[in-house]
Image (cartoon, helix red, strand yellow):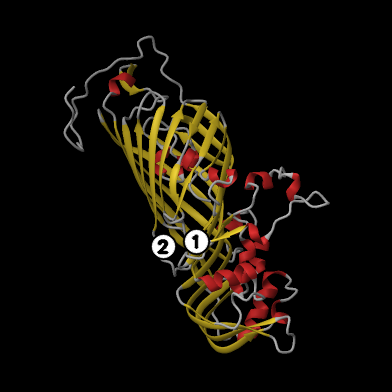
Amino acid sequence: MLIILFFQFDNIYAQQMLGITGSNYAGTNSVHNNPANITDSRYKLYVNLISNDVFLSNNYVGWGAPFSILQLLTNTTPKEYRNSQNLTIFKNAYYDVNPDGGLYHLNTLTDTQGPSILYTLNSKQSFGISSRVRAGLNFSGADLPLANLIRLGTDTLLVKNQDFKLSNTNLNLNGYAEIGLTYGQTLLDEDEDFVKIGVTVKRVVGIYNTHLNIDNAEYNIINDPAEPKKQILNIDKLIATYGYTTENTFKTSKPSVSWVFGNQSSGSGWGVDLGIVYEFRPETRKFSYRDKGVKKLDPSKNKYLYKIGVSLLDFGGITYNNPDNIRNWDVNITNTQFYSADVSKVEGLDDAYSRINNTIGLNDINGTTTFTSGLPTSLQVNFDYHFSEKIYINSLWVQDLRQEKSISMKMPSSLSFTPRWESKWLEVAMPFALLDNYNTFTFGLAGRLGPLFLGTDNLGAFLNINNPRGMDLYFGLSIPIFNKPPTLPNACFYEKDERKGLKFWKKRNR
């Protein structure tokens, strides 16, 4: 029942902004992928006003309508698919159901980045401040009967009068806000070798959480003898961990110092991002000049042939410990029935929880008022190759580090390849990716025009190509202030630096 209720939230959907975050002009948006990117930026100052990324993917049902998602969103569906009130008609036949998915999953994420700043202190140091709100639903381990039950409800022959079993089925619904402070520094700048590091420390505050981890369940659905047109969900056995925050948790959420750093929130904690980037710069002489006897590099230019970045992101968690708003139980029940009246005319989440708790016999005495929800910890490896003057090829590997059964938001693993044409004011990129834990192949398109960018990593979803099972969209608006190039008459001056330092491999002959 809880799973059915929460699938009403499948309109929140975020992934990686693959067409933008690999860019040298992504500003604060690339810092979220690797905090070392804040150093040696093309910006003196970058102010992110707003950016947002939404992502939805599953392996159970696809879009099989004769019109595209783009037509539906823009209200341009053809007349033959509209009713007399000119509203688009959507039929159950438009769902493209995958009956051979084994275990099914759903991942929806949204990432809204508010006012954020990147500032370059000097050629070796930079810092940034960021604000962000993230939310997501991760659901995994559903078999075909449960997936059919969620989509069709109890009144279908696909699920009636059969015995079903579940194990290792997990649901996590999370929402939280974060404020981050980033510092980056050049660690090595020696001729061809350049290394920079970065760290972001984040204060995270919980806005909402619900979790259900089913270890073992046996259930069936039968017609209600008292009301033949209604059904009974009969639970023979259920062993699970179940908990949530009350509606008051997000009702009292507000952007104030006391909420972020005090005790007004229902849960809070800390997180950290760590990153390192290596650049191979075989032609640094092209970007060198002398200013008042000091050798410098042109801060307005990219200097690498290729670069490799490695980062550990979102290490940490949120401890929910407000006894007025936190509920958590270890559930072990047998022979329990849910009737239609138990879930009809539900008025909000708290009402839904209360009905579930009453039916299965949960109360404050046999529960706890604290639990910890992890952040979406992931390992990311990025490779960017400068193919020609304005053409780059980027690859990004994202590996989720959270276990399926953990109480946490999860970042689905992915692997992508993104060629792009990049200049100061204009950019176009076309990502190709295996998203959603490497289950879904997509291609996308993204563009940047000065301070504005817009893109999708799943263009096929909007063009109705191959019955898409998800969608993705991102945009952003900023105030960019670029680093200035050298203005000296003899700006291109190269002097061989004889200092010794860390060598990653033998230098090429010049």
Q: Amino acid at mark 1?
A: Met
Q: Is residue 124 left or right of residue 138?
A: left
Q: Amino acid at mark 2?
A: Arg
Q: Where residue 9 sits: x, y (%)?
A: 63, 62
Residue at 46 percent of width and 58 percent of height: 376
Q: Where residue 426 sits: x, y (%)?
A: 52, 27
Q: Where residue 273 sits: x, y (%)?
A: 41, 51
Q: Is residue 369 visible?
A: yes
> The N terminus lies in which quarter of the figure?
bottom right
User: Against 289, is 194 above or below?
Assistant: below
Specify the quadrant of the image occupied by residue 13: bottom right
Residue at 69 percent of width and 43 percent of height: 74
Query: Dot 2: few (<14), some (14–19), or many (≥20) neighbours within 10 Å?
Result: some
- Asked if disc 1 and disc 2 are in contact, CB closer than 8 Å, the reply is yes
Q: Is residue 379 left or right of residue 106?
A: left
Q: Which residue is mark 2?
A: 402
- Most foreground residue, 254 or 96: 96
The CA distance from mark 1 to mark 2 is 8 Å
